[in-house]
Image (cartoon, grey):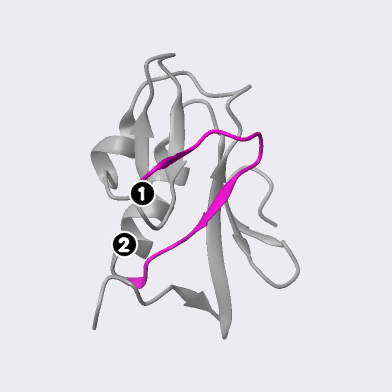
Amino acid sequence: MSVQQEAVAGGEQLEVWIDQDLCTGDGICAQYAPEVFELDIDGLAYVKGPAEELLQDKGAATPVPLPLLTDVVDSAKECPGECIHVRQVSDRVEVYGPDAE
C-alpha cells in the first residue's frame, strides 16, 4: 500500500482543509500528521499538496492519504481551534471536524 493511496469513507474519497481564521497556531495537527499539515511563518497551520507545497489559498484542500487517516482525524478531534475539516470529495459533506453531523 503506497502513501499515495487516498482515504475513503463509505467508498468516498476524503480531503482535508483548515480554516485559518480559526487556527490558534498550536501545531497539534503538524505533530499528528506532519506529512499533511505544517505551520507557516505566520504561525498558522496549512495543508500540504501532493508535492508537499503549502496550500495557502483560503479553503484549499488536499487528499487524505489512507495511511494517515487516523492521524488526520485525531488532528481534527484534538484541534483547540476546531478549524480542521475532513470532507468527502464528491459532495463536500464533512465527516470529521466541527461541522460533521
Residue drawn where x is 54% and y is 60% of the image? 15
Side of 95 relative to 28 (left or right): right
Residue drawn where x is 37% and y is 16% of the image? 41
In the displayed structure, 35 sits above or below 69; it is: above
Side of 39 relative to 17 (left or right): left
Residue drawn where x is 36% and y is 77% of the image? 5
Near mark 2 (Cα within 10 A), the count class, few <14, some 14-19 or many ≥20, is some
Say which quarter of the image contains residue 78.
Answer: top left
Residue drawn where x is 26% and y is 43% of the image? 34
Residue in the foreground of this view, choosing between 69 and 49: 49
Rendered location of residue 60, percent (x, y): 60, 44
Compute the Cα span from label 2 to label 1: 8 Å
List the residue tagged with mark 1: 36
Which mark lies nearer to you, 2 or 1? 1
Q: Quadrant of the C terminus?
A: bottom right
Magenta highlight range: 53-66
Determine the secondary structure under disc 1.
Answer: loop
Q: How many marks?
A: 2
Q: Is residue 57 magenta?
A: yes
List the residue tagged with mark 2: 68
Give the number of the disc on residue 83.
Answer: none
Q: Quadrant of the N terminus?
A: bottom left
Kindly identify the amino acid type of the residue bearing the numbered disc 2.
Answer: Leu
Residues at circles 2 and 1 in contact by the CB criterion of under 8 Å: yes
Residue in the foreground of this view, choosing between 91 and 70: 91
